[in-house]
Amino acid sequence: TALYAVFGNPIKHSRSPQLHQAFARQLGESLRYETRQPPVDDFAGGFRAFVEQEQGLGGNVTVPFKEDALRLADVVSERARQAGAVNTLIVGKDGRLYGDNTDGIGLVRDLDRQGISLEGKRVLVLGAGGAVRGILGPFLDRHPAVLMIANRTAAKAQALAELFAEQGNVSGGGYDDVTGQWDVVLNGTSASLSGALPPLPVDCLADGAVAYDMVYGAEPTPFMAWASEHGATAVDGLGMLVEQAAEAYLLWRNKRPDTATIHAEMRASLT
Ligand code: ATR
């Protein structure tokens, strides 16, 4: 049976095995999809053993290994290079290891699915770490009117904005620099994971704004709660998780799962 795995440390709470089994069931395929937790300082050894000893055919990669995966891959897609990270590894028939990144496309597919458009919109992105770098290319491809990156450490936001300057109207700064009103506010910081909230001005949300948190859970995150209180539509990142996984499945198996029913199934299993 074809074997795949998600690599992370820690990895115990990953939803990816459940997701990929749901895809396989839907498509009438049979595969094994497991978790692997290599030591934090030896992703390469862990992945090589998976391929050579277990005949693994591909892997998803999560925290803290996405940059290690970029270095390990023999061939890296343009979007993964831009993201500075690989979240999907494919063992090629030619024996080479292909690295790709489906996080950004997963996010924009989830936005499409929920009828959230970026075209011509004022888009504010919070955070300037790996998670944000991974989605900027696909976001700018959708032609927002302006995209601002705001971060606690303003210099990191400015550096990221420069990296993507050729692709659109993008600027970077600190939270103090956020002025005016924004149609889509994406929280790509890890603040929610510690129950914290980026210090946004109270009046930064435009009428009908959408607030999207890239993390998810059974309860709304502090950012989502804040946005709802101020009249925005708040969305979590569970849909992005499903969509990035479907894209990875397509890369490995050359078949695209229909995610429509899977979203509800995942949501129900969270509570
Ligand atoms: P990831 O891979 O999840 O992006 P990361 O590269 O460590 O992780 O980046 C974490 C991001 O969350 C950073 O933008 C960080 O801000 P700094 O660059 O200033 O450190 C942001 N972050 C983490 N905790 C935060 C908090 N409590 N409030 C605001 N921003 C926070």
Image (cartoon, grey):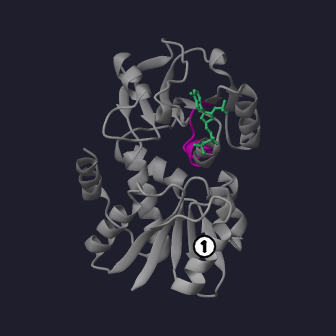
* Residue 145 on the magenta span: yes
Q: Is residue 247 above or below residue 188?
A: below
Q: What is the quadrant of residue 31 in the picture? A: bottom left
Q: What is the quadrant of residue 143 in the picture? A: top right
Q: Is residue 223 above or below residue 263?
A: above
Q: Nearer the viewer, residue 66 or 233?
A: 66
Asked whether residue 75 appears in the rendered view, the answer is yes
Q: Nearer the viewer, residue 142 or 50?
A: 50
Residue at horizontal 51 percent and vertical 37 percent from the top: 119
Amino acid under label 1?
Phe
Q: Nearer the viewer, residue 178 or 90?
A: 90
Image x and y of residue 198, in percent? 54, 23
- Magenta stretch: give its range: 136-147
Residue 166 as seen in the image, left or right of residue 151: right
Which residue matches tag 1? 47
Q: How many marks?
A: 1
* Residue 111 on the magenta span: no
Image x and y of residue 195, in percent? 46, 28
Mark 1 secondary-structure assignment: helix
Image x and y of residue 199, in percent? 55, 18
Image x and y of residue 35, in percent? 45, 66
In terms of image quarters, where does ligand 1 lie? top right
Q: Point out the image quarter for the N terminus.
A: bottom left
